[in-house]
């Protein structure tokens, strides 16, 4: 995305610089940022707005997950099988959607999702955190969600084992 935006920027600037005697202003969107070039009688100014070189992390730490659960700022989906939740335990406030059902579940209507899983369906703009026992299946669920257009999806790589250890539940 940023690369495509850079090419747009490279294509615009030379044309604008051709006649530097005329004041002008150009802005080119690049991903989540905007590159602006201003040409005035005093000179040319380049400005980057909203630019961040940091990518959204796909992993959530224990502290981040705990904070999001307390604030209600995330939908936490546990992708383990139901028997695993009964045997090992679960994080309060999480929704159980087994990994084999994640793809279909995230494409259900909100009413069907609520009926099948007993919780509100996450919207594409919601922060979703996937977790499993040890972090392997949650990564697969994250990839599935991303392919379906859920842009703010992450996973908890420590899984239930890390959570239980930190919460002294073992």
Image (cartoon, rainbow, N blue to C red):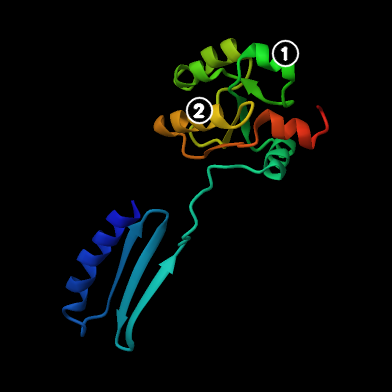
| Residue situated in front as seen by the camera: 100 or 111 | 100
Residue plotted at (50% across, 28% down) = 141
- Disc 2 to disc 1, how far (Cα)? 21 Å
Percent across and percent down for residue 154 are 55, 38
Horizontal side of residue 13 vs 95, given as left or right: left
Please rate how many residues cluster around mark 1, counting C-alpha atoms within 10 Å: few if below 14, some from 14 to 19, many from 20. few
Percent across and percent down for residue 84 are 67, 16
Q: Which residue is mark 1?
A: 86
Residue plotted at (21% across, 81% down) = 22
Horizontal side of residue 142 vs 167, given as left or right: left
Looking at the rendering, which quadrant does residue 68 occupy? top right
SS under mark 2: helix
Above or below residue 134? Residue 88 is above
Please rate how many residues cluster around mark 2, counting C-alpha atoms within 10 Å: few if below 14, some from 14 to 19, many from 20. many
Above or below residue 20? Residue 127 is above
| Quarter of the C terminus within the rendering | top right
Percent across and percent down for residue 67 are 72, 42
Residue plotted at (21% across, 77% down) = 17
Above or below residue 112? Residue 91 is below
Horizontal side of residue 147 vs 39, given as left or right: right
Looking at the rendering, which quadrant does residue 8 occupy? bottom left
Q: Which residue is mark 2?
A: 141
């Amino acid at each position: 995305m940023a690369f495509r935006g850079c090419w747009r920027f490279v294509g615009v600037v030379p044309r604008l610089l051709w006649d530097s005697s005329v004041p002008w202003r150009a802005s080119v969107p690049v991903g989540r940022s905007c590159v602006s070039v201003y040409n005035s009688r005093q000179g040319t100014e380049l400005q980057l707005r909203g630019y961040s070189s940091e990518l959204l992390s796909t992993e959530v730490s224990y502290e981040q997950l705990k904070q999001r659960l307390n604030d209600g700022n995330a939908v936490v989906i546990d992708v383990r099988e139901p028997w695993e939740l009964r045997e090992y335990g679960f994080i309060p406030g999480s929704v159980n959607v087994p990994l084999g059902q994640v793809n279909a579940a995230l494409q259900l209507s909100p009413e069907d999702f609520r009926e099948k899983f007993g919780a509100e369906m996450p919207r594409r703009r919601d922060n979703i955190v996937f977790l499993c026992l040890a972090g392997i299946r949650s990564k697969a669920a994250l990839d599935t969600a991303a392919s379906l257009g859920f842009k703010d999806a992450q996973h908890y790589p420590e899984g239930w084992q890390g959570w239980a250890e930190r919460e002294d539940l073992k």
